Image (cartoon, grey):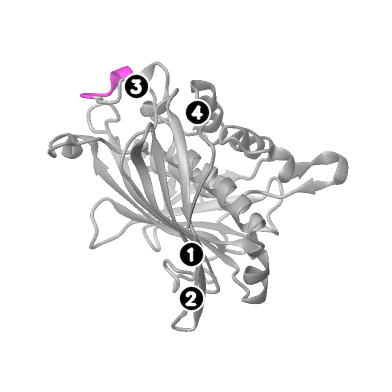
Amino acid sequence: MNIEDTDFCFEQIHIDVARNATDDFNLFHDPHKWLRIKNNPFGGPIVLGFQLESLIEKQIANYRQENNEQVIIDENKLRFSNYQFTFANAVKPGQKVNIEIKKSQFKVIADNAVLSNRISVKTDGKLALMGFKKESAKALFLADADFSNLGRLQGLDDRNYIPENGFFLKRKFMNTSNAKNFLCGSFFDQSLYFDELNDKAEFPEIFPCSLVSSALLEKALKNHHDFEKEPMVYTTHKITLDRVLLSKLKSNDALHILIKELPDEPDSYECYGLIHDNQILYRGIISLTSLQSILKQPNSRGGADTPY
């Protein structure tokens, strides 16, 4: 059984709202600067990868509600939300975007209960993104990470490396206005999360994760990366988010994003978002490749998003 939702159509205003809300200054999303990218095959700006994942978050939430699956999540204490996607093609303004969600599968694997859906995103009938959205009792990615002994990050310089462990630190502050705008850029009804008249303020899942792009950009900028001649594209996202900690997140809370390249995986980064005494809000592996290497491949279609 496949579930197909209605078509969505991103326009440049959606891209601008999302990139401004997340401080994503990558050239591929800019309506003017995309022209400065060497051998840019896309012919215009493209949608943010995290913006597509936010749309998936919305559609999965609808699916869970329609199929009464919150009962499964609550009964099995599935506190972790997992996004595992491979980017296959770019999404451009004016193209029709359709999300297909396959029927849920519930399994217990090695004492870890998992509710899983295979998902594909197509644009004008062509595959743009594919993978899984999973709810789990235990973290599926970087499960052994622990920063409880790292010490206070508030006093460290922003946009710098931590000498003790080699992580690049990017400090952000959770902002309800930015979250609202990001939701609007992803066809989300912001009132589902924010309602001042009823004292409601809940951050969605993908918004804090999306700030990883800003951190990657800042890291590249510090390393004097040439954004025009050597652009990089996302290939995969593997992200685990703790919904219990997300529910405790408040406006103006500090989010410390830590990034470090994996030693055995070039252009793959372990990424963490830490809050409240270094508790891990989210963790993930973000993998990249150069645009030029993709263009050299036969029948190349390009990536769906770029961090720099």
Q: Depth-wise, is mark 3 or mark 1 nearer the camera? A: 1
Q: How far apart in space, not on screen, are marks 1 and 2 (Cα)?
A: 8 Å
Q: Amino acid at mark 2?
A: Lys
Which residue lies under the disc numbered 2?
Answer: 107
Which residue lies under the disc numbered 1?
Answer: 116
Q: How far apart in space, not on screen, are marks 3 and 4 (Cα)?
A: 20 Å
Q: How far apart in space, not on screen, are marks 1 and 4 (Cα)?
A: 26 Å
Which residue lies under the disc numbered 4?
Answer: 9
Instruction: Tell me the SS state at disc 1.
Output: strand
Q: Amino acid at mark 4?
A: Cys
Q: Left or right of 246: which side holds 201? A: right
The disc, 2 or 3, on the residue closer to the chain's N-terminal end is 3
Q: Amino acid at mark 1?
A: Ser
- Magenta residue span: 35-39
Instruction: Tell me the SS state at disc 4.
Output: strand
The disc, 3 or 4, on the residue closer to the chain's N-terminal end is 4
Q: Are marks 3 and 4 in contact (CB under 8 Å)?
A: no
Give residue 80's position: percent from left, percent from top: 56, 66
Instruction: Tell me the SS state at disc 3.
Output: helix
Q: Which residue: 46% across, 47% down?
A: 100
